[in-house]
Structures are given as C-alpha cells and as structure tokens.
Image (tube, rainbow, N blue to C red):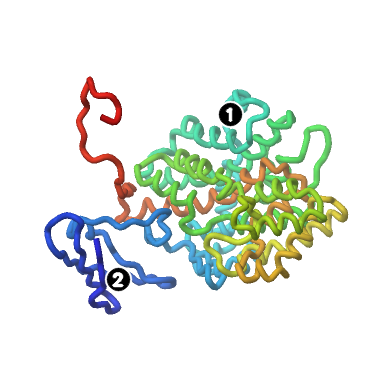
C-alpha cells in the first residue's frame, strides 16, 4: 500500500491509497479534527470501509483513541494541565481531594462543594468486615500489588448495589467508594504483609494523613502524623492523579468499553500499572540504587548506561512523553529536599547515593544532550523511602493516586456517545490458508 496527501486545508485531507489487492487507486477524504490544544488528528474511522486498508501503529503512539477534556500534555515543552490548570499550581495550592473533584467534575470546587465531596468520600472509607477474611487467603509474603489487585477486583462481590453503569447515581456511588477505600485497602495490604493488626480509617484526618495513619499507627500507642510528611504525600498523590491516555488509563477505558463494572475496570488498571515500565518505575529506582550500592561505583554505572550494547538502564531518568524536564519532577525535587531536611536524613547510604546520581545526571553533557533529566519516579522513590514506606508499596500508593484519574476517564468514556467497544486491528503475518492432513508429518 502506498498513500499520499494530495490536498490539505484546515478541515479536510484527501488521501489516495493503492491497496495491496487488485482494485486500482481508491480515494478517501478524511476530516481533520482540531482540539483546543495539541496537534490536529486525522479522523480515519471510514478508512477501512472505503479503502480496505488499516493503519499500523504499534503502541498507538500516533493514534488518538478518544476525545477527552481532562488532561493535556505537551512533552516537548514540559507542560501538564488538568482541566487547563498547570500541575505545579495544583500541587502547590490544592488538597488531593480538590484535585479529585476537579478531574471528575471539571472545575475547582467551591467551599460548599468541597465539604460535600469530602463528606461523601469519608462516608465510604471503611471496607466490608468480611474483606478482613479475604486478606487472610493471601500468602503473608505476597506482593502488596497482588493483594490490591485481588481485593479491588473482589469489591464487585461486596458492593453489588453500585454495578449498573447505566445508572448515574450508581456510577457516582461506585466512584466515591473506590476513591475512599483505596487508601484503606492499600494500608491493609501493608499491615497484612508485616503481621500487624489493621487500623480503621480516621475520618477527621485528611486523605494523605489518613493513609499514613493506617499504615504506621498501631493500637498500642498514639500516633501523630508529621505535617511535612503529610504535605509531601499529598503532593505525590496529586502529581500521580492522572496522566492522559497512558497504558493503565487506556486499559481502564478499554475494559470499560465492554460495559464492565467500575471495580473490574479499576482492577484492570491496577494490573497494567504493576508493570516495571509503568507504575513500577519508582520501585525500580530504589532497586537500581541498591544495585549500584555506593557512590564510588556511580561512574561505572554511568558508563554502562551510555553503552548501547549494555542492557543496563538508569531508572528514573528520561520519560516516554517528556522531552523536556518533567514538570512533576520539578515539584518533587523541592519536596524531596524538604522531607530529607525534616527527617534529618544525612548519611543514609541510598539517599546520599541518589543525591549524587542526580547531581551527575544534571551536569553530564551526555544526559543533557539526550534530555535524560530525573523524572517523577526518581524523586518519589527517594521521598517514599525516606518516610519509611517499603519499596514494595511504592506502586500501591501510585495506584491509590491514579484511581482518581482512572475514574474520571472512565466516567468521561461512559458519557461519550461516540465511544464504542475497543477492538484494535492487526497486521497479520502468519500462514496463509492451509489444510490439515492426518498422515502428513510437520513441514510436508
């Protein structure tokens, strides 16, 4: 197949296609759609029906799968906007639940709207008591993401009164339940793994404070949340709340396109997020630092990172989307310094190693030329390590934050009349038609 643009104006592209099968040249006019920001897109919905050709786009890196009003990213300029608001401003001025409301409803809430939203969320922070028994079915050494994946998927068996996605009220109740219960589910996974009793949520605490309380408090002693740590976690949650049509968000949308219930959709997102190339990246940062081991070995690993023939990669540097400094990393770099100073983490080997690696990466011509700046995973991993959160819990907290974005994207998809069940096509390169013969050996 060959194709070429003959004419193009602001609204229409004329495409001529020479199909691989006989039939001559076929022509099709493709509308050009313009968003409020970002590149224009070719509407190829009628391409196959009129030309007998598909497009080929592994990873969908040049394909818009949906229309959305939630998040905009300009990777070349290092811009991330939620409903038009820069992520830096939201992280500096908002609570996580204010950002959650913004993503779901489209506007920063008024004080009255915010208080109502907080009340609706905190009403659902507890989980069904029978879920305590569900946790005991997991091995004690199970990865917390495995536990979270199983528990969230099981919520549809406990909250069957909010599964009808055609009912707007049920959709909203399910959304509130998921946002409210994710910190509780996450903290219970942590407590189960270390053999401590589960702590019930305290609804007089903020979202981040409550998560820290459930993770670190015990029934035997009073526990007070450090406000510096709480502010840091609040910003980490905000910075991870949504990131346009990434792998896990696309998974949630694809799962939801079949009409699956919201708990199943979010469980699918968690499964995708678990991958080390996605949500597991900040955990991979700490594993990498452990592998390096000492500041004296940094030059050795820098050299390996530059060697195209060496499979070693410096985790936490560069980004698939951002070809400039990750705006979320700019926020967390400052937060990281505040947390390390507050907790007096001077001389802790891994954290000192991370600071030295950051310094080298920001000054080394190779990293500057390749635009391999420290990303959000690099700093969030250091912060979470400093405040005492186990490495295996990093991706779990990412899932807690991203649940808000998944829900906002899912709700937007449900309300989009043009949305259809996802059904990607393929370029088939296997055998052509052949017939089974009982007596024929393989290859004959």
Q: Secondary structure at mark 1?
A: helix
Most extreme residue toward the left, as rendered? 23
Q: Residue at x 71, y 64 (%)?
A: 361
Looking at the image, which is closer to me, 195 or 220?
Answer: 195
Q: In this figure, which residue is indicated by the disc labeled 1?
A: 131
- Residue 151 higher or lower than 32, as above or below: above
Q: In which quarter of the view is residue 134 placed?
A: top right
- Residue 248 higher or lower than 75, as above or below: above
Q: Secondary structure at mark 2?
A: strand
The number of callouts visible is: 2
How far from the left and from the top, in percent, is residue 380? 68, 54
Most extreme residue toward the bottom, as rendered? 9
Q: In this figure, which residue is indicated by the disc labeled 2?
A: 32
- Residue 339 higher or lower than 169, as above or below: below
Q: In which quarter of the view is residue 182 placed?
A: top right
Q: Residue at x 53, y 37 (%)?
A: 152
How far from the left and from the top, in percent, is residue 253? 41, 49
Q: Residue at x 53, y 43 (%)?
A: 270
Looking at the image, which is closer to me, 210 or 150?
Answer: 150
How far from the left and from the top, in percent, is residue 407? 48, 50
Most extreme residue toward the front, as rendered? 444
Q: Quadrant of the C terminus?
A: top left
Query: Which numbered tag is attached to residue 289?
Result: none
């Amino acid at each position: 197949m060959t194709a070429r643009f003959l004419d193009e104006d602001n609204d229409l592209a004329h495409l001529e296609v020479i199909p691989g099968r006989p039939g001559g040249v076929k022509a099709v006019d493709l509308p050009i759609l313009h968003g409020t920001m970002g590149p224009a897109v070719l509407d190829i919905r009628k391409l196959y029906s009129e030309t007998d050709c598909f497009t080929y786009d592994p990873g969908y890196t040049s394909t818009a799968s949906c229309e959305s009003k939630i998040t905009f990213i300009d990777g070349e300029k290092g811009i991330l906007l939620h409903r038009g608001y820069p992520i830096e401003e939201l992280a500096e001025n908002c609570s996580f639940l204010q950002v959650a409301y913004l993503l779901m409803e489209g506007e920063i809430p008024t004080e009255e709207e915010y208080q109502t939203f907080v009340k609706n969320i905190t009403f659902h922070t507890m989980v069904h008591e029978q879920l305590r028994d569900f946790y005991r079915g997991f091995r004690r050494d199970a990865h917390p993401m495995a536990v979270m994946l199983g528990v969230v998927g099981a919520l549809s068996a406990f909250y069957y009164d909010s599964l009808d996605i055609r009912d707007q009220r049920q959709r909203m109740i399910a959304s509130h339940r998921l946002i409210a219960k994710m910190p509780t589910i996450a903290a219970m996974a942590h407590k189960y793994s270390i053999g401590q009793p589960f702590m019930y949520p305290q609804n007089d605490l903020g979202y981040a404070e409550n998560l820290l309380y459930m993770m670190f408090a015990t029934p035997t002693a009073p526990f007070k949340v450090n406000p510096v740590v709480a502010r840091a976690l609040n910003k980490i949650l905000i910075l991870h709340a949504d990131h346009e049509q990434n792998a896990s968000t696309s998974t949630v949308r694809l799962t939801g396109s079949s009409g699956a219930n919201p708990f199943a959709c979010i469980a699918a997102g968690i499964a995708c997020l678990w991958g080390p190339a996605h949500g597991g990246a900040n955990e991979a940062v700490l594993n990498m630092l452990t592998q390096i081991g000492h500041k004296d070995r940094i030059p050795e690993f820098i050299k390996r990172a530059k060697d195209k023939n060496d499979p070693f990669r410096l985790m936490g540097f560069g980004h698939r989307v951002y070809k400039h400094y990750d705006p979320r990393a700019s926020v967390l770099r400052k937060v990281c310094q505040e947390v390390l100073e507050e907790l007096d983490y001077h001389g802790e080997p891994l954290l000192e190693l991370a600071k030295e690696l950051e310094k080298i990466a920001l000054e080394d011509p190779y990293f500057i030329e390749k635009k391999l700046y420290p990303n959000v995973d690099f700093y969030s991993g250091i912060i979470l390590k400093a405040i005492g959160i186990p490495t295996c819990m990093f991706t779990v907290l990412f899932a807690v934050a991203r649940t808000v974005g998944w829900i906002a994207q899912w709700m937007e998809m449900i309300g989009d009349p043009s949305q259809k069940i996802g059904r990607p096509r393929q370029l088939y390169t296997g055998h052509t038609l052949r017939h089974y013969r009982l007596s024929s050996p393989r290859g004959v």
